[in-house]
Image: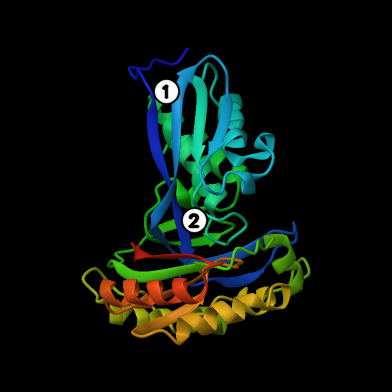
């Protein structure tokens, strides 16, 4: 059995992931899509607890618990089971997930929860977060799980396995989900790439902007981010046109500097020049659209 000095319940956050950019390089012959993305993490998060014990279980609570679907399909359990297969004698226990992030929303909620589960199990079992077994399990659990394990701003390439840290400033933001789930597979189907197809050529790679260095301002970052789009936004608009309504609301708000969709949608975000502008915009949009999930905060 693995040694552990941990006693009592452990807790971790599953922070929302936001794709500030998302380029689809192409579709590989194995069917997976190669991506290039600048990823940041929000100050809103699911909460995951782990009570060490003999059985692996999961209980979901919180305002969006029902949206998680069948517990047996949850990525928390999938990650735990895969890690138990990879690490003999792995200590497990009872997970409790407080779900506050919308699901099928393009902000990696399920992936963030799975990553939090891996961090908790690593802590319980004395494993390093850069243990190759944990890294392999993260990628096997889902393409967004590896980036959610450290939950730090970075560039993400390949199918999610290549990560390079970025010195991102704190970005005041508003995030909106219209409470309409969007399946990633439907968006990629609407994109319509066949295995072997490429969207990004050599000239695109050579023309790609360099990301700002440490100490750059929010304005510096917005200028560069504005040069690179989210390639999944047009197909997602076909799948769920309400995304256009959300983007219109963000782009019409006071103080907005950049607004676009995150991931495969339907969550959209906007960056503002100050936290005060972000809070005011979030409050105004929430009042106008009480049926939407709205969060005003920061990305980092």
Q: Residue visible at 33% across and 84% down?
A: 255
Residue 127 on image: x %, y %: 40, 28
Foreground mark, 1 or 2, reads 1
Q: Residue visible at 45% across and 20% down?
A: 52
Helix, strand or loop at mark 2 = strand
Residue 224: quadrant of the picture? bottom left
The mark found on residue 162 in the picture is 2
Q: Is residue 29 above or below residue 5?
A: below
Q: Residues within 10 Å of mark 1 (few under 14, many from 20)?
A: many
Query: What residue is shown with label 1?
Result: 125
Residue 18 on image: x %, y %: 47, 63
The C terminus lies in which quarter of the figure?
Answer: bottom left
- Left or right placement of residue 272 versus residue 69 in this view: left
- Left or right placement of residue 171 versus residue 161 in this view: left
- Left or right placement of residue 54 versus residue 284 in this view: right
Helix, strand or loop at mark 1 = helix
Q: Residues within 10 Å of mark 2 (few under 14, many from 20)?
A: few
Residue 125 on image: x %, y %: 42, 23
Q: Is residue 212 above or below residue 46?
A: below
The residue nearer to you, when weighing 28 against 254, is: 254
């Amino acid at each position: 059995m693995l040694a552990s000095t941990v006693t009592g319940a452990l807790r971790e956050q599953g922070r929302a992931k936001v794709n500030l950019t998302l380029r689809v390089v192409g579709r590989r012959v194995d069917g997976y899509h190669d991506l290039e993305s600048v990823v940041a993490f929000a100050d809103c998060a699911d909460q995951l607890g782990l009570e060490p014990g003999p059985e692996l279980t999961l209980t979901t609570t919180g305002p969006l618990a029902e949206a998680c679907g069948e517990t047996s399909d949850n990525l928390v359990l999938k990650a735990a089971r895969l890690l138990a297969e990879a690490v003999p004698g792995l200590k497990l226990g009872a997970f409790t997930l407080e779900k506050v992030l919308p699901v099928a929303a393009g902000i990696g909620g399920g992936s963030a929860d799975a990553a939090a589960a891996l961090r908790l199990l690593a802590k319980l079992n004395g494993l390093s977060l850069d243990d190759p077994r944990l890294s392999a399990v993260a990628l096997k659990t889902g393409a967004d799980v590896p980036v959610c394990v450290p939950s730090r701003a970075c560039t993400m390439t390949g199918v999610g396995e290549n990560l390079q840290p970025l010195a991102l400033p704190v970005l005041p933001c508003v995030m909106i989900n219209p409470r309409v789930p969007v399946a990633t597979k439907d968006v990629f189907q609407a994109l319509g790439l066949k295995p072997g197809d490429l969207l990004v050529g050599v000239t695109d790679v050579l023309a790609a902007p360099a990301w700002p260095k440490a100490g750059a301002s929010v304005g510096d970052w917005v200028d560069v981010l504005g040069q690179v789009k989210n390639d999944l936004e047009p197909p997602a608009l076909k799948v769920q046109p309400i995304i256009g309504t959300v983007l219109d609301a963000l782009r019409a708000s006071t103080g907005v500097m950049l607004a676009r969709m995150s991931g495969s949608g339907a969550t959209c975000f906007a960056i503002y020049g100050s936290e005060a502008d972000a809070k005011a915009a979030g409050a105004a949009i929430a009042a106008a659209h009480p049926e939407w999930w709205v969060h005003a905060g920061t990305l980092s």
